[in-house]
Amino acid sequence: MERMFLWALFFVLFSFCVSSGKETEPPLEMEHLTSELLESARTPEFFDWLVRSRRKLHENPELSFQEFETSEFIRTELESLGVNFTWPIAKTGIVASIGSGAQPWFALRADMDALPIQEMVEWEHKSKNDGKMHACGHDVHVTMLLGAAKLLQQRRNELKGTVKLVFQPGEEGAAGAYHMLKEGALDKFQGIFGLHVAPDLPIGTIGSRAGPFMAGSGRFLATIQGSGGHAAMPHKAKDPVLAMSLAIISLQHIISRETDPLESRVITVGFVKGGQAGNVIPETVTFGGTFRSMTVEGLSYLQQRIKEVIEFQSAVHQCNATVDFMEEKSRAYPATVNDEALYSHAKKVGEHLLGGESNVRLLPMFMAAEDFSFYAQKMPAAFFMIGAKNESMKSGIQLHSPYIVLDEKVLPVGSALHAAVAISYLDGQSVRSN
Ligand SMILES: *[C@@H]1O[C@H](CO)[C@@H](O)[C@H](O)[C@H]1NC(C)=O
Ligand SMILES: *[C@@H]1O[C@H](CO)[C@@H](O)[C@H](O)[C@H]1NC(C)=O
Ligand SMILES: *[C@@H]1O[C@H](CO)[C@@H](O)[C@H](O)[C@H]1NC(C)=O
């Protein structure tokens, strides 16, 4: 009994020390910060500005490393907010700074490029550039980061360090993040946070997971050289079509026979080109695709085996093959791996901002790839999906669909979340170093 009393006393004292100590985030302060940010971003004036910006970007999509007008639009907005920035980085990229200018430096990231897709949604702000569309929501990503810039700029004198806003080119296969890093634009950063819209998650929810979240991904292009001839006399030719057919089938055996069934790996051949006529054996054929894995070792294993399988299957048919992994043009992306501590931080901020744990979901790993992974290799990083589901959109429509409709109510939520994650991260760092 007495012992229990002592324990109880100890517990009360202990919890008092913890709750008054500097180490833990006072929940009330976080509650206050997040609701204030969200309220600001949802005022009609702020929301209208977000919607106008997003629609302007949506109407004018530009492909990877051609984001010249997008970049100019961002710079104009930053200038009118009075925010400093460095430009150009990796052709069209921008890094803006808000705060004291001193360390710690914490980054928020948005990608700027669109896809070579013809928009099929009929609405007032449909893409004006034929064959190009913001079908991956990067227009929304840019706008949410501009929204965060505005919120942060209002609080610039209270920031305990510096928030860096990274607007990067070329996420869609062109490894823009790799090129931003290569130019040294993110040296000495302590961490980075990124958001991606999710058309299947409701507004007011986010989701992610600690550790590996999205796949590493590479591309390949194969050419099989045979020797052409008359289709009626195959013995006088070397048929590259048959060699390719067997090679494509054998590629799937790398997954089904060489990969642990409990590991996630994918090989997909996405195109084949060869031949012109039904009565001619062509000289050459080309085909190509993508391969994915959740680990660095998995990705390099697949790369090595794809080359071997295509070369050997070609040899079986007396043809020659070359396999190109296009390192310069479409560099392989590593897997996106979330830092445990930064993931937990963003999750906690999200729970406060979105009013409850059920709005912050634990998502399964998935095999899409993201060049945010290059940042995650260099510094602690956390990448979250954010709900942008528009109830009017037919279910089953995914990112990269010409029919995608994103709900603009995500804009204030994403802006406030970006800002809250950065502000409270810097607050936490200053507590630790005090
Ligand atoms: C912005 O630029 C001004 C003028 O160069 C400088 O004094 C200030 O420190 C800069 N702010 C940040 C956050 O880098
Ligand atoms: C394949 O390459 C070898 C060595 O260069 C060559 O002798 C042969 O003719 C080539 N075969 C075809 C079908 O191109
Ligand atoms: C949702 O989609 C409908 C139909 O396209 C559109 O009218 C509405 O503005 C969208 N909602 C938002 C908030 O974007």
Image: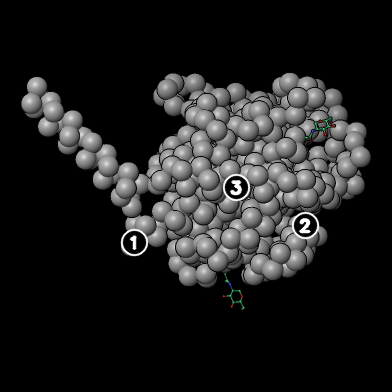
Q: Which mark is residue 70?
A: 2
Q: Secondary structure at mark 3?
A: helix
Q: Circle 3 sits on which residue?
A: 36
- Image point 86% across, 33% down: which residue? 121
Q: Secondary structure at mark 2?
A: helix
Q: Nearer the viewer, residue 156 or 87?
A: 156
Observer-side mark, 1 or 2, equals 1
- Image point 74% across, 50% down: which residue? 46
- Image point 78% across, 33% down: which residue? 405
Q: Position of residue 111 (x, y in %)?
A: 66, 51
Residue 100 makes an appearance in the image: yes
Q: Is mark 2 within 8 Å of ligand 3?
A: no
Decide if residue 368 is on the left or right side of residue 296. Answer: right
For marks 2 and 3, the one nearer the N-term is 3
Residue kind at label 3, given as amino acid type: Glu
Q: Nearer the viewer, residue 194 or 264?
A: 194
Task: State the separation of the CA atoms marked 3 and 1.
Answer: 26 Å
Residue kind at label 2, given as amino acid type: Thr
Q: Which mark is residue 433?
A: 1
For marks 1 and 2, the one nearer the N-term is 2
Q: Is the residue under label 2 in contact with that under label 1 (CB below 8 Å)?
A: no
Q: Residue furthest left?
A: 2
Q: How many marks?
A: 3
